[in-house]
Image: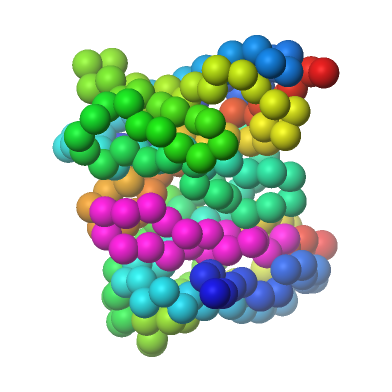
Amino acid sequence: AQSVTQPDIHITVSEGASLELRCNYSYGATPYLFWYVQSPGQGLQLLLKYFSGDTLVQGIKGFEAEFKRSQSSFNLRKPSVHWSDAAEYFCAVGESTGKLIFGQGTTLQVKP
Amino acid sequence: NAGVTQTPKFQVLKTGQSMTLQCAQDMNHEYMSWYRQDPGMGLRLIHYSVGAGITDQGEVPNGYNVSRSTTEDFPLRLLSAAPSQTSVYFCASGRAGTEAFFGQGTRLTVV
């Protein structure tokens, strides 16, 4: 069965430091992969997506993610974190029908 | 440019009451879905639809009904509310093989 694992439930980084959020997936075919961000009390906003092609994808707000088929991973990175990046981040795998399967989420706290 | 609209934003129900959460999209998306979000559990799929007249169960369908009579609307019905259904509910729409667009959520409390 398809599944998504985000191993880190909570991460704290200092403002200006680099960030990497981990995501591992289990899916039988070539996956569609997504990262979404959710600020407190808000809906989900798409950060970036991977469908095919270049395995390093750029998203909004300075985020990028790299698809590694051999590791079944799609980790999210940002070189320098801003206080406004504090939020909950969700990795998801999408089926061709449009159905999305989400990981449990990683809460990012940013220290001043 | 409305996107995905959910109503109501907040709701308090008594145990045993029924209600319908509304979801409408204006992007002509064939795919629509309902998720519930609970702390530490991410978003879990309740029901989804790949087009008008077609619905299917997700991971946690018990206690919920859906129907899809039009492309635009995908209401979620709670038949007899239970405290375990206290959650934040999100509706999403999209096209096959693309990202999903989410509504702002409905925060439901069952007392």
Query: Is B9 in the magenta?
Result: no
In the rendered image, the quadrant that contains the C terminus of chain B is bottom right
Viewer-proximal residue, A62 or B3? Answer: A62
Q: Which residues are magenta?
A: B90-107
Residue A65: percent from the left, percent from the top? 41, 27
Instruction: Note whether residue B36 is visible.
Output: yes
Compared with A104, B5 (above or below) is below
Image: A35 above or below A46? above
At a point 53% along the width and 64% down the height, the residue shown is B91
Quarter of the image for the N terminus of chain B: give it: bottom right
Q: Nearer the viewer, residue A69 or B67?
A: A69
Residue A53 sits above or below residue B16 on the image: above
Is B64 displayed left or right of A97 in the figure? Answer: right
**Residue B91 is covered by the magenta coloring:** yes
Q: Position of residue A43 (x, y in %)?
A: 62, 54
Quarter of the figure with residue A34: top left
Residue B72, position as x, y percentages in the image: 43, 81
At horizontal 49% and vertical 22% (from top left) the residue drawn is: A77
Q: Residue furthest left?
A: A29
